[in-house]
Amino acid sequence: MKLNLVPARTGIQWVKLGIRTFLRQPLALSGLFFMFMAVMSIATMVPFVGSALALALLPAATLGLMAATREASRGKFPMPSILVEAFRAGQQRLQAMLVLGALYAAGFLAVMGLSALLDGGKFARLYLVGGQMTRELVTADDFQAAMWLAMALYLPLSLLFWHAPALVHWHGVAPVKSLFFSLVACLRNFKAFTVYGLMWVAVFIGGGVIITSVAALTGSPQIAGMAMVPAALIMAAMFFTSVYFTFCDSFVADIDPLNSGESP
């Protein structure tokens, strides 16, 4: 397994493949994404450790969605059990995935902790625990500063973990090494990932414009309110579907991935 460098236009291809694969199995992939969201939400309800538990489960759950995309791209119907694929790969890789989850939770909580230095924890509490979002709260200078700092710090954290679950699960890479390889792959293919991100921003904005335009043309503004949330969730499911293809093109396996059960 080695790093593969791709041109900037590959970012467009990743988006197209994500949407195209989702449309092959829309019910299965959207259903799995909703199950993914439900598991994360239920995990946050665990007393005292709910937020940390949900964060720790995120790498394994993301791997499950990538595995589902792999199945759909091969013309197969991904079953719900595929979401727990990360927990069925043997003791060694299970432990590695749990370590990866713990590292992600620690990293995310550290980001929230640093943001709390600017606003006394208001942004962190709202994000992790929830609460009433008021105009006065979100427009406060300290809250805004904490939010922007958290976003700036989360970017390198997301790059560290972007490919890490797949590297750990499919290639047996140690958790810490997987973080390094993931970061290097994202940085070396920075142009492609920039195009990829901009394309998804355009897709989300375009979806919102279409919905509001239809509502305006029909004279029923309530249509926009009813359609916006499910449309956003479906587009988010498409986005998660496309993540698998960013991994496939960023690394070259030493063996044929189509003939191996251990590689994507």
Image (spheres, rainbow, N blue to C red):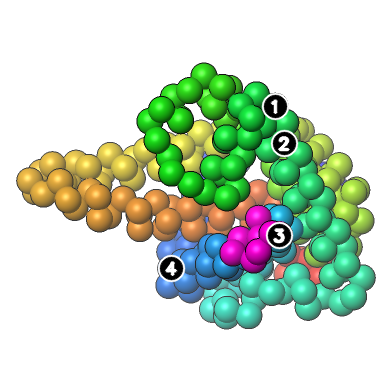
Q: Is residue 190 magenta?
A: no
Question: Which tag is nearer the camera, tag 2 or tag 4?
Answer: 2
The residues bearing labels 3 and 1 have C-alpha atoms spaced at a distance of 22 Å
Q: Earlier in the sequence, mark 4 or mark 3?
A: 4
Residue 207's x, y, as percent?
A: 33, 45
Label 3: which residue? 49
Label 1 close to label 2 by CB (< 8 Å)? yes
The residues bearing labels 2 and 4 have C-alpha atoms spaced at a distance of 38 Å
For the residue marked with disc 2, what is the amino acid? Gly
Give the class, few, some or many, for how many residues have Cα within 10 Å of label 4's Cα (few <14, many ≥20). Answer: some
Label 2 close to label 4 by CB (< 8 Å)? no
Q: Secondary structure at mark 3?
A: loop
Q: Earlier in the sequence, mark 2 or mark 4?
A: 4
Label 2: which residue? 113
Residue 12 is marked as none
The residues bearing labels 4 and 3 have C-alpha atoms spaced at a distance of 34 Å
Residue 117 is marked as 1
Q: Looking at the image, which is closer to me, 128 or 227? A: 128
Q: Secondary structure at mark 2?
A: helix
Residue extent of the magenta highlight: 44-51
In the rendered view, does 240 fall on the left or right side of 109?
left
The residues bearing labels 1 and 4 have C-alpha atoms spaced at a distance of 43 Å
Q: Earlier in the sequence, mark 3 or mark 1?
A: 3
- Please tell me in which quadrant of the rendered image residue 264 appears: bottom right
Residue 206's x, y, as percent?
A: 34, 40
Label 4: which residue? 26
Give the class, few, some or many, for how many residues have Cα within 10 Å of label 2's Cα (few <14, many ≥20). Answer: some
The residue under the point 25% across, 50% down is: 225
